[in-house]
Image (spheres, rainbow, N blue to C red):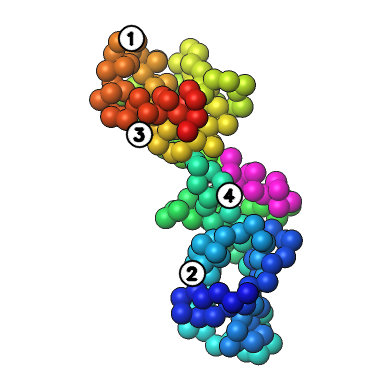
Amino acid sequence: MIIWIENREYQLISNAANSIHIDYKNPELPVIYASASLSIDELTTYVKQYAKKNRLITQAETESFDFFTINLFDNSYPVKPINEGKSKPYLKNNIIYFSKSEFKSKTQKKLEESIHDIIFEQSILVLIAKWEEILNILVEEVIFKKLPSNYYKISNQKLLFNKKNSSLSLKINEYLILKALLDLTESKSRIQYKLEQYFSDHKQIEKILAYGN
């Protein structure tokens, strides 16, 4: 199959691997080996983000990158490895970056799970800090744990946040955070007022949480 990406032809060959490999042996028609589960949009994102532009490619040269996506916050994020330096994974401009040196001993499955959990917890903590400042309150401790049914639990100024919330959109997670923090300080009547104040679509969000979308 021939596809066009940024005015250049590529031959697309499906394989069973959970990665993408670009072979430049024929510079006139590079070959992309990719999982059949990846969409054309994901392949396009990969080539745009990772392909090195304006570089001379010899006949024998092959360029290969590990490429995968992580499903998080009701979205699919491309993941880009960083070969140099050491840093925790981070999300920037809808792309997840991670240092290869930090995950040398991980299998692909463990790697994806670790990055998923780190980005989820980072994002939630940033949102908690945002609402702590807005509401002028302070959570004593945040614990991430899989809960059987509750989206979160509050106990003694501690917030227990369900790790399964990672499948919900970022906006719904932010709504849950606001609701949890209000549970710490406000009466039920005030909670409803505040939710309506900050989330005009709170009724729709509550329906999604109650019945799914």
Mark seen at residue 70 = 4
Q: CA distance from mark 2 to mark 4?
A: 18 Å
Residue at (67, 49) in percent of width and height: 111
Instruction: Give amino acid for label 2.
Output: Lys
Mark seen at residue 11 = none
Percent x, y for residue 145? 60, 27
* First to last magenta residue range: 107-117
Query: Are the residues at dot 2 and dot 3 in contact (C-beta closer than 8 Å)?
Result: no
Above or below, 61 relative to 115:
below
Residue at (61, 59) in percent of width and height: 38
Instruction: Give amino acid for label 3.
Output: Lys
- By secondary structure, the bulk of the magenta-drawn segment is best described as helix
First along the sequence among labels 3 and 1: 3
Q: CA distance from mark 2 to mark 3?
A: 33 Å
Q: Is residue 113 magenta?
A: yes
Instruction: Give amino acid for label 4.
Output: Ile
Percent x, y for residue 73? 49, 41
Mark seen at residue 130 = 3
Query: Are the residues at dot 4 and dot 3 in contact (C-beta closer than 8 Å)?
Result: no
